[in-house]
Every structure is written in C-alpha cells, then in structure tokens.
Image: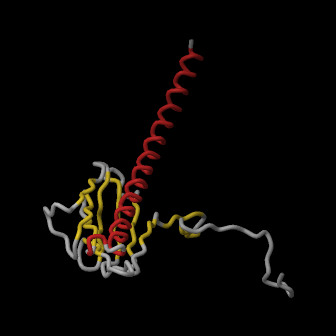
C-alpha cells in the first residue's frame, strides 16, 4: 500500500510540474500570436498606403489594450473607417516610444514613416515576458524577443552561433 501511495504521489508531482510548464508555454504562444497580429495590421496599413487605396494614407494607433487601423493622416476617435483590434485580457502594450505620439502613419509611394520607434507587448501576469515591436523609419517592422545570457556571454535571439571546429588565425592559406 505504501508503494502504491508513493507512486501515486510521484505521478501527481510530475503532473503538476507538466501543467505549470504547459501554462507558461501557452502564454508565450499567445504573446507571439498577438505580436504577429500587430505586425500584420501595420503591414496592412503600409500596403494600403503604398497601393493608394482610396487615394489616402493609412496608419495604426497603438494603445495599452488595443490597436486601431485608421484611414487618413491622423487618428480620429469614432471614425467609422477605424478598425479596432482588442488584445487578449492577459496582455498589454507598454512603453510606447514612437516619434510623434502613439500612431504610426505611412508615407505614400515608398511606405516609410516619420513615426519610427518601438513599443512593448507584455504579459500582465509576468511583465518580464515581453516582445518589443520595432518600427524603422524605412517602414520595416520587426520583433525583438530580447537578449539572453548563457555562460556570461550575451547572445541575440535573432542570430545563430556555430563553431567551425577549427581556427584560421595562424593559417598561411585560406581556402
């Protein structure tokens, strides 16, 4: 009987550990999906502008709990052309650092923007889990998942390090 209770206890502990890990994994997936959705809306606004849809410019307004695709050179609250996208209740946008305010408006012809900068999408329950969305002046948009450290070496998550297994420092011939 003691052996059975011990096995049941071990299985319960393993189940609890797996449940915790799956929960944090799903929160990371939700964060990734939301950041990709924001980027898709930014690219839609850029595409509408460069394609001269309705002979107008388009932009995206960034707020703490939502982002809004709008038509025109500036955001107008209540405009019937606005399309609002609400963030899941577990996420929020913080640290909005865009030139000129909270909106990104694209220029016609080349799709560039005067509203470069970045903003942070994060989990409300764990504010250390973030995605920084970067808006370049050229109109390029990207996600920075942050820097990680391993063995006192700082690595960028966007790059891959590999070891060739040999050195060319003292080589006389390069091939």
On the image, the x and y values in percent for residue 30 come to: 40, 50
As displayed, is residue 56 above or below residue 157? below
Instruction: Point out the residue furthest to the front here.
Output: 54
Left or right: 139, with 173 as reference point: left
Quarter of the image where one finds residue 74: bottom left
Q: Residue at the far top: name it.
A: 1
Quadrant of the snapshot with the N terminus: top right
In this picture, is 37 found above or below 137?
A: above
In this picture, residue 153 sits left or right of residue 138: right
Image coords of residue 51 (percent x, y): 36, 73
Q: Which residue is the extreme one toward the right?
A: 172
Front residue of 109 and 26: 109
Apparent side of residue 105 relative to residue 12 in the rendered image (left or right): left
Front-most of residues 136 and 126: 136
Coordinates of residue 71 in the picture (x, y in percent): 23, 69
Q: Residue at x 24, y 63 (%)?
A: 63
Viewer-proximal residue among 105 and 32? 105
Q: Quadrant of residue 106?
A: bottom left
| x, y percent for residue 45 | 32, 68
In this view, the residue farthest toward the bottom is 172
Residue drawn 15% across and 63% down? 79
């Amino acid at each position: 009987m003691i052996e059975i209770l011990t096995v049941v206890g071990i299985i319960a502990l393993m189940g609890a550990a797996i449940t915790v890990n799956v929960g944090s994994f799903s929160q990371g997936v939700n964060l990734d999906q939301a950041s990709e959705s924001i980027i898709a809306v930014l690219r839609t606004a850029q595409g509408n502008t460069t394609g001269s849809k309705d002979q107008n410019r388009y932009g995206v307004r960034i707020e703490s709990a939502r982002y809004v695709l709008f038509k025109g050179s500036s955001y107008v609250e209540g405009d019937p052309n606005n399309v609002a996208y609400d963030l899941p209740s577990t996420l929020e946008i913080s640290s909005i650092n865009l030139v000129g305010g909270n909106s990104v408006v694209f220029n016609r012809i080349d799709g560039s923007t005067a509203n470069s900068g970045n903003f942070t999408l994060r989990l409300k329950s764990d504010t250390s889990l973030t995605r920084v969305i970067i808006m370049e002046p050229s109109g390029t948009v990207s996600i920075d998942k942050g820097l990680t450290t391993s063995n006192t070496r700082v690595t960028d998550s966007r790059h891959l390090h590999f070891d060739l297994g040999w050195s060319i420092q003292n080589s006389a011939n390069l091939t």
